[in-house]
Amino acid sequence: MKFNGKVSIVTGAASGIGFAIAQALAKEGANIVIADIDEKGGKKAFKTILKIGSDSLFVKTDVSNRVDCKKLIDKTVKSFGRIDILVNNAGLQHVAPITDFQEDKWNLLINVMPTGTFLCTKYALPYMIKQKSGRIINISSVNGLIGMKFKSAYVSAKHGVIGFTKTLALEMAEHNITANAICPTFVRTPLVDKQI
Ligand SMILES: NC(=O)c1ccc[n+]([C@@H]2O[C@H](COP(=O)([O-])OP(=O)(O)OC[C@H]3O[C@@H](n4cnc5c(N)ncnc54)[C@H](O)[C@@H]3O)[C@@H](O)[C@H]2O)c1
C-alpha cells in the first residue's frame, strides 16, 4: 500500500494505459479521480476502481477545455481535500502525410496533449504548492524523442510535453513538486489498434 490515502488524478483513465495506471495506483491504496472525455468508458473504469476498494470519482473532462480542467481540479479538492499525484495521460493519434494533414486534426492533437497537460497542471499547482508536495507524471511517447513519418502532430505534441515537463521540474523543485515524463513505445491499446 505504497500510495495509501494519496489523491491521484489520471486523465484519459477510461481506457488503455491511463486505465492501467489508475488500477495500479488504486491497488496501492490511492484514491483515484478518473478524468476522461468518454463518459461511458469513464463510468465503467470508475466501477472497476471501486471494486478494487479505492475511493474514486469520475469527472467528465475534455482536457483541451480550460473550464473543464479547472472544474476537474476543484471537484477533486472539494471531494478529497488535496491532490498528491497528477497523471497527464489523455491523448490521441492521427496519421497522415503533412501535405494532407487536416488542420483541425493538428489543432486537436496539440490542444489535447501539450495544452491539456499544461491546463491540468496549471490549475493543480496552487494546491500542490500550498501542500509543499506533489508528483506530476506526463505521458509523452518515444515520439517525444524521435520523429516518425506521418505523425507530425503527434510527434510535435509529444516533444512539447517533454519540453513542458523539463520547465515544470525546474520551476517547481523549490516546492518539493517533481515532474517526470514517461516515453512508452508501442502498447497494445485502442489507440494503437486504430493505427493497425
Ligand atoms: N499505446 C501506445 O502505444 C502509446 C505509446 C506511447 C505513448 N502513448 C500515450 O499514452 C497515452 C494513453 O494512450 P492509450 O494508448 O492508452 O490510448 P487509449 O485510446 O486507449 O486511451 C486514451 C484515453 O484518452 C482519452 N481522451 C482522448 N481525448 C481526450 C480529451 N480531450 N480529454 C480527456 N480525455 C481524452 C480517451 O477517451 C481515452 O480514454 C496517450 O497520451 C498516448 O499518446 C501510447
Image (spheres, rainbow, N blue to C red):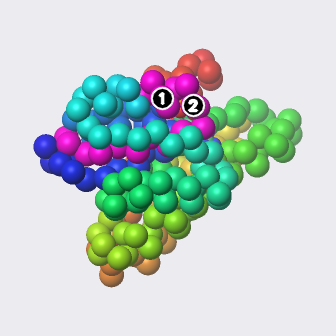
State the residue position of label 2. 39
Tell me where the magenta segment starts and ends, as one range: 28-45
* Residue type for callout 2: Glu
Amino acid found under the numbered disc labelled 1: Lys
Q: Residue at x 47, y 50 (%)?
A: 88
Question: Looking at the image, which residue sits at the far bottom?
Answer: 174
Q: Give the residue displayed 34% in from the left and 55% down from the top.
A: 80
- Looking at the rendered structure, the secondary structure element under dot 1 is helix
Looking at the picture, tell me which residue is in the foreground, 114 or 156.
114
**Residue ranking furthest to the front:** 78
Structural crowding at the residue carrying mark 1, measured as other residues with C-alpha within 10 Å and reported as few (<14), some (14–19) or many (≥20):
some
Query: For this view, does 122 lie left or right of residue 136?
Result: right
In the picture, the disc for residue 150 is none
Between 138 and 8, the one nearer to me in the picture? 8
Label 2, residues with CA under 10 Å away: few <14, some 14-19, many ≥20: some
Give yes or no for contact between labels 1 and 2 (Cβ–Cβ under 8 Å). Answer: yes
Does dot 2 land on a helix, a strand or a loop?
Answer: helix
**Can you see residue 147?**
no
Q: Is residue 12 above or below residue 168?
A: above
